Image: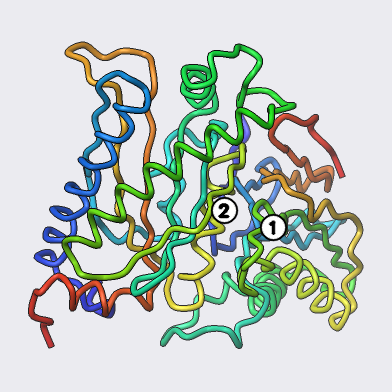
């Protein structure tokens, strides 16, 4: 049986066929996948916040922020000798499940995460091939580096492949 | 978790107080449902984000959750979480209408509103007990209900923590129907996640001397 590499919240991991890579229960968080169609190398990050500048921590958990997570995905792929110019990206998540009237900026974190990922990818010239973002539902995603397809599961909805 | 300032002793005191809050909430829930309900606090601890999923039960299980903000001296998030089927049972016991479901959409307005109300009542009695013991003013916001994966829901309460740390202080309360034998019925959790800025006022109010 193929193994599934599990990426937890604020975590980043790499995968190669025959393994697949998955992250569960994305709410306002965003799952980012960078992959190379030829070498079938890929990495996934489960980010919670748009920018590492928001950190009030002593030591930075780089996988938690869109900017540093994408930087680290690139570094890890480079280490594995993936040609950086050929990398592509997919993403899913960034839902807004609650809409409190008095809500602080923190409640709007989903859309902010999505925007941050788009900007980061753009500045690094990484094409965003597909995405399933926003809305009011949580998502579980699984990427197969062999087919480069991303399966998106949403509660009470059909599985989407993007 | 040294950086948070909490020691085991602090967590024990917090657990005691939370247990009293849980007792009050259980009484309120029992009255509402007209049957004995049990609520107790199995744990008060710092849970790393990566372990959060395991704490919330079955990974792929769909839950109904009422989410409330706690405002006041020790802000945080409150989640009343039941498996979707149990939530439906609970709602139907209140509305006596089998069309009110939180299991499969479309969820009726009545089901959502009844579930919100239970969340409201639980939060109110839980927080007023905490207030009485700590002298902290704690006010719940109106609740909002979502039906989804537990992790996706609770992650909304973790955002407040995520800028500060990679763990959250989780005050877990287990809810179950009182019975001598394990029964299928209403079994769920009530989670209180105080925001990091609440750690100081909480510690202070517990009357325990801060170490260092």
Label whose residue precedes the other's in the sequence (2 or 1): 2
Chain containing mark 2: A
Q: Does residue A79 show up?
A: no
Residue at horizontal 74 percent and vertical 59 percent from the top:
A33
Residue B50 lies, with reference to residue B161, above or below; the image says above
Tell me the subunit letter for badge 1.
A
Quarter of the rendering containing residue A29: bottom right
Specify whether B4 is left or right of B157: left
Looking at the rendered structure, the secondary structure element under dot 2 is: strand
Residue A7 has which mark? 2
Q: How many marks?
A: 2
A123 or B43, which lies in front?
B43
Does the residue at mark 2 contact the one at mark 1 (Cβ under 8 Å)?
yes
Q: Is residue A117 left or right of residue A4?
A: right
Q: Quadrant of residue B207?
A: bottom left
Can you say whether A58 is above or below A107 in the image? below
> What residue is disc 1 on?
A31
> Measured along the vertical axis of the image, is residue B170 above or below residue B22?
below
Residue at horizontal 91 percent and vertical 58 percent from the top: A129
The crowding category of the residue bearing disc 2, from other C-alpha atoms within 10 Å (few below 14, some 14 to 19, many at least 20), is many
Quadrant of the frame with the N terminus of chain B = bottom left
Q: Nearer the viewer, residue B152 or B175?
A: B175
Residue B8: quarter of image: bottom left
């Amino acid at each position: 049986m193929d193994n599934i590499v599990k990426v937890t919240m604020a975590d980043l991991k790499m995968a190669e066929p025959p393994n697949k890579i998955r992250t569960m229960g994305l709410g306002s968080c965003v799952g980012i996948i960078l992959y190379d169609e030829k070498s079938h190398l890929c990495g996934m990050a489960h980010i919670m916040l748009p920018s590492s500048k928001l950190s009030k921590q002593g030591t930075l958990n780089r996988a938690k922020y869109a900017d540093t997570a994408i930087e680290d995905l690139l570094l890890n792929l480079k280490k594995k000798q993936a040609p950086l110019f050929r990398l592509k990206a997919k993403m899913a998540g960034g839902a807004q499940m609650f809409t409190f009237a008095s809500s602080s900026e923190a409640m709007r974190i989903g859309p902010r995460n999505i925007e941050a990922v788009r900007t980061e990818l753009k500045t690094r010239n990484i094409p965003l091939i597909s995405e399933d973002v926003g809305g009011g539902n949580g998502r579980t995603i699984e990427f197969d580096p062999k087919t480069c397809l991303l399966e998106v599961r949403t509660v009470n909805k059909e599985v989407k492949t993007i | 978790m040294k950086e948070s300032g909490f020691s085991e002793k602090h967590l024990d005191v917090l657990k005691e107080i939370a247990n009293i809050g849980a007792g009050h909430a259980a009484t309120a829930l029992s009255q509402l449902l007209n049957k004995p309900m049990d609520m107790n606090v199995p744990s008060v601890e710092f849970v790393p984000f990566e372990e959060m999923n395991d704490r919330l039960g079955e990974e792929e299980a769909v839950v109904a959750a009422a989410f409330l903000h706690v405002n006041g001296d020790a802000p945080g998030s409150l989640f009343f979480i039941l498996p979707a089927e149990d939530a439906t049972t609970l709602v139907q016991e209140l509305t006596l209408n089998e069309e009110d479901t939180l299991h499969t959409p479309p969820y009726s307005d009545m089901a959502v509103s009844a579930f919100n109300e239970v969340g409201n009542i639980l939060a109110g009695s839980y927080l007023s007990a905490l207030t009485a013991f700590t002298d902290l003013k704690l006010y719940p916001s109106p609740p909002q209900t979502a039906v989804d994966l537990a992790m996706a829901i609770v992650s909304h309460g973790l955002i407040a923590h995520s800028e500060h740390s990679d763990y959250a202080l989780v005050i877990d309360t287990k809810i179950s129907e009182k019975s001598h034998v394990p029964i299928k019925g209403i079994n769920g959790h009530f989670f209180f996640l105080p925001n990091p800025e609440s750690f100081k006022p909480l510690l202070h109010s517990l009357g325990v001397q801060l170490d260092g």
